[in-house]
Amino acid sequence: MSGSEATVPVPSSPPVPVDQGTGRDAILRAARRAFTQRPYAEVTIRGIAADAGVSPSLVVKHFGRKEELFNTVADFGPAAEELFDAPLATLGRHMVVTLVRRRRELKSDPLLRVVFSLGNQDERSLLRDRFHEQVTEALIARLPGRERALRAELIAGHLLGLGATLSLHRDGAGSLATPEHLADLYAPALQTLITG
Amino acid sequence: MSGSEATVPVPSSPPVPVDQGTGRDAILRAARRAFTQRPYAEVTIRGIAADAGVSPSLVVKHFGRKEELFNTVADFGPAAEELFDAPLATLGRHMVVTLVRRRRELKSDPLLRVVFSLGNQDERSLLRDRFHEQVTEALIARLPGRERALRAELIAGHLLGLGATLSLHRDGAGSLATPEHLADLYAPALQTLITG
């Protein structure tokens, strides 16, 4: 449950998802579904509570009002900070290894949920805006050289694609490979886009 | 509207989406939303018709009963055939150029809809099964060398990631780049996985 990232700005050790029977994880899952699949205006605390099988007041107790809950669910900042926390020369490999480890620890992908928001094709999406600011713009700021925006978008694509295919082939060959071996095969593409 | 692929087994020229005021495209869009976001058992022709703003009988007239409509929406076969239709030595570039052209012609990604089905994490998804058979297995069959399943999964990841990032940055740098230029930057990753 990557929603816990929102309360851990710079994780120095792997965050561990803990529910402790409070319904916290169920609420986060329900909130993620709601905010990614429906326009912000249509999402209600009541609906999220019903989906999570808890009372609306428990949702507010754990996460505050709707806007605060959205900010928890939509926050890609801590994940981006962790994914991009390496020297440029080894950043491609660091991103792949970190993404795979984080997915396995949290049983959730740190970035992929933004893709579910593409289902609402007609809606301007706050979740997408957040991703642009916290992931794409952060990458652009780190890249040297030319065509930085285009390269950052394609790097984001490679990262989203890795998450997508690992989720899609949940019991596939990727699920049996070590993060390091996945990086051997997948990271050179990112590294070329990083160092230009 | 990539649903039109289902009626064009091997497109020799770019298919053009035509609605002609029949509601066909609206029905396909609604069906895609329904089948990707909900378990198969919960999807109804009535619900799709309501979402598309047409009568249930019009849905059946155009696409047949629920199972046939699902087969139309879920069919990745023609897209896979077109994407993989090149010699191995140039397949990476062909896949990127074809994917980008097809997205622009049809205003829809030929593969990406499978990712929306990941929102239902607990459900076994017929859409995902279809993707495995028609995309991943088809790729495995084409690849030479070792670790073919893993490489095919990662190639599928690169393709899904490209579609995801282009959709996510709809007005970004990628939207202004030619398919050939996108291939210059993005295809080497695929080619390395193809030729091993």
Image: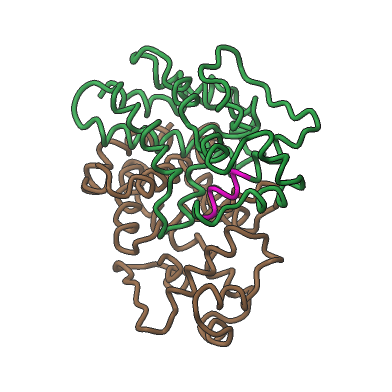
Chain colours: A brown, B green
B32 drawn magenta: yes
- In this view, the residue in front, B154 or A152, is B154
A38 on left or right of B75:
right
Magenta residues: mostly which secondary structure? helix
Q: Is residue A145 magenta?
A: no
Residue visible at 49% across and 33% down in the picture: B75
Report the number of numbered marks: 0
Q: Residue A37 sits in which quadrant?
A: bottom right
Is B64 located above or below residue A114 in the figure? above
- On the image, the x and y values in percent for residue B176 come to 64, 29
User: Residue B164: in sight, yes or no?
Assistant: no
Find the residue positioned furthest to the left.
B146
Corner quadrant of residue B29: top right
Q: Which residues are magenta?
A: B31-38
Image vertical order of residue B62 relative to residue A9, above or below: above
Q: Residue at x 45, y 29 (%)?
A: B186
Quadrant (top left/top right/bottom left/bottom right) for the C terminus of chain A = top left
**Front-lying residue, A108 or B59:** B59
Residue, far right:
B21
Q: Position of residue B152 (x, y in %)?
A: 32, 32
Residue B45 in picture, x, y percent from top left: 63, 48
Q: Between residues B38 and A65, which one lies in front from this camera angle? A: B38
Please state if B90 lies on the left or on the right of B146 as rendered.
right
Residue B98 visible in this rendered orientation of the protein: yes
Position of residue A29 in the picture relative to residue A124 (left or right) = left
Q: What residue is rendered at 64% in x and 39% in y?
A: B28
Q: Where is the N terminus of chain A found, in terms of image quarters? A: bottom left
Q: Position of residue A180 (x, y in %)?
A: 22, 46
Q: Which residue: 66% across, 53% down?
A: B47
In this view of the protein, which residue sits in the foreground, A38 or B22?
B22
B164 lies above or below A74? above
